[in-house]
Amino acid sequence: MDFHVDLQDRRDLSGNIYRELRAAILDGRLRRGERLPPTRELALRLDVSRNTVSLAYEWLTAEGLLEARTRAGSFVQGEPLPREARKGQASRVRLRARAFWREQPDAPERRPPTGYGFDVGVPDARHFPFDTWRRLVARQLRAAALPAGYADAVGHRGLREAVVRHVGVARGVHADVEDVLITNGAQQAIDLVGRVLIEPGDCVAVEEPGYPPARQVFHSLGARVVPVPVDAEGLDVRALPDSARLVYVTPSHQFPLGMPLSPARRGALLEWARQRDAVIVEDDYDSEFRFGGRPLETLHGLDRSGRVLYVGSFSKVLLPGLRMGFLIAPPSLQRELRLARRVMDWHGPFAEQAALARFIDGGMFARHIRKLRREYAERHARVEEGLARHCAEWLEVVPSLAGLHLSATFRRGGLKLEREAVERARAADVGLVTLSRYYAGPRARPGLVLGYGSLPTARIPEATRRLGACLAAASGGP
């Protein structure tokens, strides 16, 4: 009997045994009719439990590669693959993806978490009410609660109603339940808008610096994406290209710099869109966390012509892994958006949507936000204090009163200092995100984007102290 099982990786013992036996059958080392060792014998030989071997045998039997005969044992049923099919990767045709995807850089490497990580856009999972959420979802995982077939593409009606009430009170966004479409996060909402509105070659304007995944969505749909500069008042409306069919903007808390779009710019942007028959996508990604000042009215609330599509996300308040967001769109697009959602993935997870509706309507969502707002406000203040104490010689903080991150630009040193600081910080167990990564054009502004959502409050003073030491070393100081 010619097979060997490598069990160095003991995290998936049954899977390893299954894969090794399957490969031996398909390449002819184990021949049809050959009897495998009894599960007890093989378990002793491999020093694993009998159940581990039995599970692997069951998988092979279900696949038709083994036959279990009563009181006789397990016998090979599968035939080896033809020699041509066993040649592996070298004999396979190399398929070519579209040029856009071939030209995209690889996704950023997911590095191991650091002890003092300024991760951007990541909330603190320790504050998520797991026990409450588990109970709410469990209530929905019953035959009486789940739909018998596919659910509505626009999402659970109860959650849509809850979203209308929430954004009406919290953000002054006035909408009907029919205007709301529940999505798998804000990214899917942006994708849906692009699929419905953008033709290949259309011009789409985005902020510079801005949110790279939004740019990538529009690029992938064949749009001509034009970065538009941002200053202290937000998006420079005067720099918008006249040919833009759509403008993507983060007016409440510009990503990543943090300033809000000024009232004058808001009016100018709405008027610009009216005159050019353009659409505005308003991404209100973390507006729940505002720590001072008067909240500015949303573009959607100011819009009188139905040109603003409002995108919201639950990722920053709950968990990114839940993948829940929403899109509020005018009646003129609702039919097409519903069709596009059905084509994309039909609908989202029904049980989780129903659970979130109960979470909101039961007042738990509002209490959760209040708790997090206090926590993140303290972290925001501590980061500002730490930067002023340890990093003021090198970093100038961009004023911001909301969200889960702060941005700071380098006073001197440029991109070279930015790169050197990141390398030294990694060696000091400090995780950094550069500001330059959020620029699409060549004139990237060097700096840092410092997220504090997942950085424990007690660690912030030490994190900023270490950051200051890294900046001193990177700039040639003591």
Image (spheres, rainbow, N blue to C red):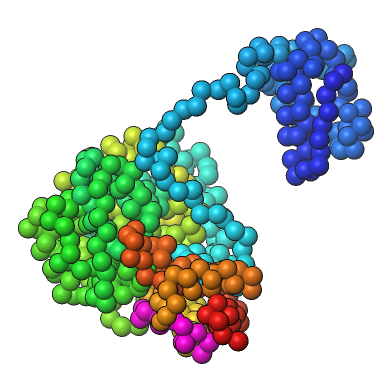
Residue 401's x, y, as percent?
36, 79
Residue at 34% of width from left, 36% of height from top? 342
Magenta run includes residue 327: no
Residue 56 rendering spot, x and y as whole percentages: 76, 29
Is 195 left or right of 53, judged from the image as shown?
left
Residue 394 belongs to the span the image colors magenta: yes
Q: Quadrant of the C terminus?
A: bottom right
The spot of residue 423 in percent (x, y) is: 57, 68
As rendered, which of 219 and 410 lies closer to the eye?
Answer: 410
| Residue 161 at least partly seen | no
Please give the name of the residue rendered at 20% of the width and 49% of the height, measured from the top-left corner.
203
Q: Nearer the viewer, residue 351 or 399?
A: 399
Q: Residue at horizontal 73%, vertical 23%?
A: 23
Magenta region, residue range: 389-401
User: Which quadrant of the structure image shows residue 428?
Assistant: bottom right
- Find residue 198 and report its image quarter: top left
User: Foreground: 212 or 171?
Assistant: 212
